Image (cartoon, grey):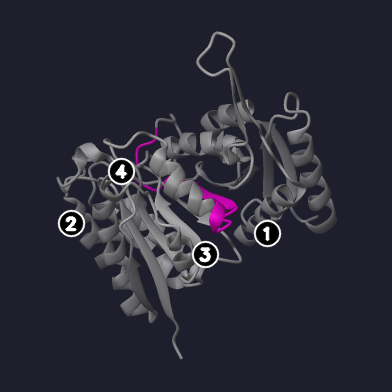
């Protein structure tokens, strides 16, 4: 009996609903040729709801979302809502409550996509960043003393646990083995300065690798060196594993070298629970309702969603559709410069994916 997947959909703010519509269009198209079934459950979490109700997301939402097979997110961020409210009230809340302890970010340059790196092409830019997603500086452990005075003190603690670090590292080793490219895992850290927190990362990285993954080559790079080599020699990387803060930084750099936010997608994963997939570019409110935003990042997020569900053939179809659109149709990945509307790009990908 064919399983029917339950996909929780959070279109979100700005252009989020527009790009999610195109992602769902493509998922629907490949479901018909790949033979899987799904149903969607829509949630209105975002800026408009917050301004009407005063809450970013009701407490009951987490328990409801735990019953879904996966979550498909458009974008969070509203120009009339103070920065941080929606991010903490929705994104971070879901990551922590659903224990989505991995942030997975492929950095892959497709053919006919501009990269600011001179003399680099798709054969050079194809690696994955595995970012720890529920610890580090993002837990908000800290506070103020004498706030608003000349003697003010502000602290924010980078908290790392052996459990949290090791499960992220183990996931990265498994992913490197499954990816089966160069079978090289690079730890990105700052052991020469963060001598407590990143000593833990370094020890766990080598202990786990030596004991359980002798087939995977281990490498190390300070975070500043990682940024440098991502620009100069991105082909050196296969899979990078890193802490929450550093992962947040280097994945935006990764998005730029793969062609920009319009094509970058990511996943917040709980490999044993409910994961959430999203385009990286944000809500882009200035383009809302114009039909000019690039939906490829959201469509790529849909590809990742299906792959995590085990629908690998359908996911491969979507990637094929994205590549063909980039090769045959789009003039640019930038909003308003594609040569096609948002909806037309979705139609093209869906068509190619079903060939």
Mark found first going from the N terminus, 4 or 3: 3
| Res. 274 mark | 3
Q: Which residues are magenta?
A: 96-115
Disc 2 from disc 1: Cα separation: 38 Å
Residue at image mark 1: 174
Mark found first going from the N terminus, 2 or 3: 3
Residue drawn at x 20%, y 44% as measured from the top left: 288
Residue at image mark 4: 283
| Res. 85 mark | none
Disc 2 from disc 3: Cα separation: 31 Å
Residue 325 appears at what percent x and percent y? 28, 55
Residue 196 versus residue 148: which sits nearer the camera?
148
Q: Secondary structure at mark 4?
A: loop
Mark found first going from the N terminus, 2 or 1: 1
Mark found first going from the N terminus, 2 or 4: 4
Residue 223 appears at what percent x and percent y? 63, 30
Closer to the eye: label 2 or 3: 3
Residue 233 colored in magenta in the image:
no
Categorize mark 2 by other alpha carbons within 10 Å: few (<14), some (14-19), many (20+): some
> Residue reaching furthest left?
290
Residue 162 appears at what percent x and percent y? 77, 47
Q: Secondary structure at mark 2?
A: helix
Residue at image mark 2: 344
> Which part of the image, by quadrant, shows the C terminus?
bottom left
């Amino acid at each position: 009996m064919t399983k029917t997947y339950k996909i929780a959909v959070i279109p979100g703010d700005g252009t989020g609903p527009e790009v999610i519509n195109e992602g769902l269009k493509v998922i629907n198209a490949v479901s018909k040729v790949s033979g899987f079934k799904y149903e969607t459950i829509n949630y209105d979490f975002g800026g408009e709801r917050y301004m009407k109700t005063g809450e970013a997301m009701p407490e009951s939402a987490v328990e409801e979302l735990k019953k879904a097979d996966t979550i498909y997110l458009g974008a969070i961020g509203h120009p009339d809502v103070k920065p941080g409210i929606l991010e903490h009230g929705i994104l971070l809340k879901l990551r922590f409550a659903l224990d989505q302890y991995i942030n997975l970010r492929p950095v892959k340059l497709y053919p006919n996509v501009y990269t600011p790196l001179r003399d680099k092409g798709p054969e050079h830019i194809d690696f994955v960043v595995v970012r720890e997603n529920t610890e580090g500086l993002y837990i908000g452990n800290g506070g103020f003393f004498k706030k608003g005075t000349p003697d003010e003190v502000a602290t924010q603690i980078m908290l790392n646990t052996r459990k949290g670090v090791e499960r992220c590292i183990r996931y990265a080793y498994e992913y490197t083995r499954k990816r089966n490219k160069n079978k090289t895992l690079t730890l990105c850290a700052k052991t020469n300065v963060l001598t407590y927190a990143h000593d833990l990362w370094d020890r766990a990285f080598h202990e786990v690798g030596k004991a359980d993954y002798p087939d995977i080559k281990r490498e190390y790079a300070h975070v500043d060196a990682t940024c440098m080599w991502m620009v100069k020699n991105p082909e050196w990387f296969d899979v990078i594993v890193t802490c929450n803060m550093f992962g947040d930084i280097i994945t935006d750099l990764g998005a730029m070298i793969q062609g920009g936010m319009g094509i970058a997608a990511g996943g917040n994963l709980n490999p044993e629970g409910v994961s959430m997939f999203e385009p990286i570019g944000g809500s882009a409110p200035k383009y809302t309702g114009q039909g000019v935003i690039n939906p490829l990042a959201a469509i790529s997020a849909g590809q990742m969603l299906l792959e995590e569900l085990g629908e690998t053939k359908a996911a491969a179809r979507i990637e094929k559709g994205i590549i063909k659109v980039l090769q045959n149709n789009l003039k640019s990945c930038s909003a308003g410069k594609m040569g096609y509307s948002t909806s037309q790009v979705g139609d093209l990908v869906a068509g190619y994916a079903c060939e």
